[in-house]
Amino acid sequence: MTNYLPAGTSYDKYLKTYIGGCKCEDPTRCTCGLRKGVFPYGYITSVGVLNEIRLPPKSAFYSDLRESDIKDEDYEFVKFAWNQHEMKTLKDLLIWYNNLDVEPFVSAIQAQRELFRKFDLDMFVDGVSLPGLSEKVLYQSCFKGLKRPKKVHGAPFEFPLYRFNGYEAQDTKAGRDFNMSITHLNQLVRKQLYTCYHCFCKLDVKNASADRINNSIGHIDGNIMMSCIACNVARKDMSPAAFRYQKMIEHNSDKLVYSIDKEEKEIYHKMKANNIWKEYANTVQAYWKYLSLDP
């Protein structure tokens, strides 16, 4: 579970963040079940000790690990719980102590999972850590509200004949059918208002091209859209819809965060070494705290 928490998060802080802390007026008489209990671990030297019928003195709660006694307030709380729950043996105290750890913890986990479900994420399925989930939330939010490039209409022109003849030569060399008229190209570019189909830049005599929709067949009327030469070359075998989306991503590049692939593995290792993703996790944790959460 620690994978889904920022480093150093205590049990008490986790509960306060996701389900709130104890609101009882007198913390020594807490009945809400949100206050952490205490148990005399060092006092239990054998299983038989759990059958003792009296609450041990405060000194029995001394922690060898922390090298400290419990606070007077904590001992008063244990005495109250002993009477409130009509405990008969130390075994009852142990059960009470364990339940105080488990039940609120489960409720906090459920609350944390519900918060991630707002982003269509299952905390335990879609990520193995809080930074990983935070990264997915980050990608979701930054890809919302993308804007397409503004269409720039060009001035009317006639498609150059030399470029048209070049397409016929390309198809002949590649063994593809060629059945395209220059009249059809002029009609298409006029219909598109002299604008590139993909990037929406203006078309002119210098940059206009006949871009095949299906690149596995030749230049045929009905298989053509008008684009700038740069987009025609860059699209290759990508579908028109996918390439147009790519151009929109490029247009919004100043607001997007991208995944790091193998080509940038050196950057990845530097980010990992410096806990960069931890900052995203801390941001998400602060967001949860703002929503619920910690008074």
Image: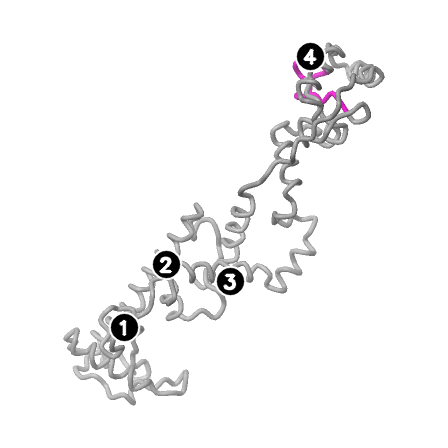
Judge depth for marks 3 and 2 and give the one in front. 3
Q: Which amino acid does label 2 sit on?
A: Ile
Q: In the structure shown, which secondary structural element does the residue marked by tag 2 occupy?
A: helix
Residue 9 picture quarter: bottom left
Question: Mark 3 — residue?
Answer: 282
At mark 1, the secondary structure is helix
Q: Residue furthest front?
A: 155
* Residue under label 4: 221
State the image quarter where residue 189 is shown. Answer: top right
Kindly check if marks 3 and 4 are in contact, taking CB atoms under 8 A apart as contact: no
> Is residue 175 a member of the stretch shown in magenta?
no
Tag 3: residue type? Answer: Asn
At 39% from the left edge and 85% from the top edge, which residue is drawn? 64
Which sits in the foreground, 63 or 236?
A: 236
Which element type, helix, strand or loop, lies under badge 3? helix
Secondary structure under tag 4 reads loop
- Mark 2 or mark 4: name the one nearer the start of the chain: 2
**Residue that label 2 marks:** 109
In the foreground, 75 or 146:
146
Q: Report the amino acid beneath label 4.
A: Asp
Label number found at residue 12 = none
Q: In this view, does 220 lie above or below 11?
A: above
Q: Distance between the residues labelled 2 and 4?
A: 60 Å
Residue beneath disc 1: 97
Drawn side of residue 36 relative to residue 276, left or right: left
Residue drawn 57% across the image and 59% down it:
277
Q: Which of marks 4 and 1 is in front?
A: 4
What residue span does the magenta drawing correspond to? 208-223
